[in-house]
Amino acid sequence: MVYGPTVLFALGEGAVIPLIPVIAAQLGADVATAALVAAALVVGQLCGNIPAGWAVARIGERLTMAIAGAVATLAVVALALAPSLGVFAIAVLLIGFCAAAFGLARHSFMTTRVPLAFRARALSLLGGTWRLGMFIGPFVAAALIAVFGDEHATIWFFGACLIATILLVLLGPDPEKQFAPPPATLVEDTGEPVTGSIPTAERIGVFRTMWRYRGVLSRLGLAAASLSAVRSALHVVLPLWGLSIGLDAQTIALVVGVSGAIDFALFYASGQVMDRFGRLWAALPAMVLMGAGFVALAFTHDLAQSAMWFALFAAVLGVGNGLSSGILLTLGADAAPKADPAPFLGSWRTLTDAGGAAAPLLVSAIAAASTLAVASGVIGVIAFLGAAAFVRWVPRPTPPPAGAR
């Protein structure tokens, strides 16, 4: 009940995402417009984080997930039956909006329920379940297209995943009741007069939360956004790099697939490292590895063995990305107020999603003005700057008790 809905949602979304530009092109979009339609998914996530924080704080994680699943189901129907490119783009935007609500609801749930001693492992596993869906989804899509001969089969598969998700959320055992957060400590009523005000839980709302925690968001939040940007750039640079050195599509897919497999294989190791040694011990090696990978890759474009170097540094980037699994979720959970984390997490996720959305635009602009090698080097520099920011701003918690290890 904790991880199952996330796997189902990610599996369906992972099957549809690679085909969004293809179906957009069938509806009359050129290459630039198809890319813009695909970017509507990220825009939807950016727009959805803050409203999702408000919804989770008011109606709870379970109901927010159910509503997000229902709206996403309607968007999937619109996606499959879209008569025009505009309707199709709006449906993609809505799916991104609902994905933000779904992800934030589960993030908030884990933040309030999971003990600190194994929080990083639990959140790395949550990130791993999302990666599992995104990793398997394209293979499911390929199988469905082979059987039915129509890209729209993947959209209906996404709809089936969403219906299963809604049923699981609404009809299964409620984790919010099974894993209640620790109750607030109550003061014994002695009958004596009380001076001063009686403390009560305060809901301060999304925008007041952003202002109250502006220091954390402007420091640690920007460091987290740099990690999100580097991750996002990885998925853009590697395919483009393969094309620029003359590799065929099959070879590029193989190299990127191996990098993704390494990334996926390391997701739980990241949580183990964070829980045992502290958050910085996963964040810093991840950023340094990815920074070194991007900078080194920038010098290999014109070498005789450029394909070999491409495969090698794609693997290095996969290791770095795998070691970063769950870091953004864990740091957000650590920094969030314990009583009402959802509004803060909405702001946190907006920052990290903004970093992820900006990176492809940055790569595109630099590559257009100069070369892809320069763009790769710039992303590497951003990774090193992010590593320095993590060293400066990640809190150094006290080690967990020996029994928790």
Image: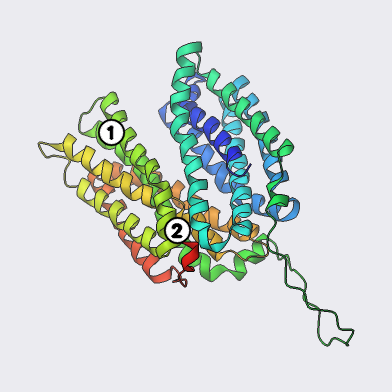
Q: CA distance from mark 1 to mark 2?
A: 27 Å
Q: Which one is closest to the eye, mark 1 or mark 2? A: 1
Residue at point 25% right, 33% down?
Answer: 242
Secondary structure of residue under mark 1 = helix
Residue 371 visible somewhere in the drawing: no
Q: Amino acid at mark 2?
A: Ala
Residue at point 49% right, 69% down?
Answer: 401
Can you identify the residue that label 1 sits on?
255
Q: Amino acid at mark 1?
A: Val
Task: Say if 3 sits above or below 246 in the image.
Answer: below
Q: Position of residue 357 (x, y in %)?
A: 46, 46
**Horizontal side of residue 104 vs 240, given as left or right:** right
Towards the viewer: 401 or 8? 401
Can you identify the residue that label 2 sits on?
224
Q: Position of residue 108 (x, y in %)?
A: 62, 54
Q: Earlier in the sequence, mark 1 or mark 2?
A: 2
Q: Position of residue 286 (x, y in %)?
A: 34, 55
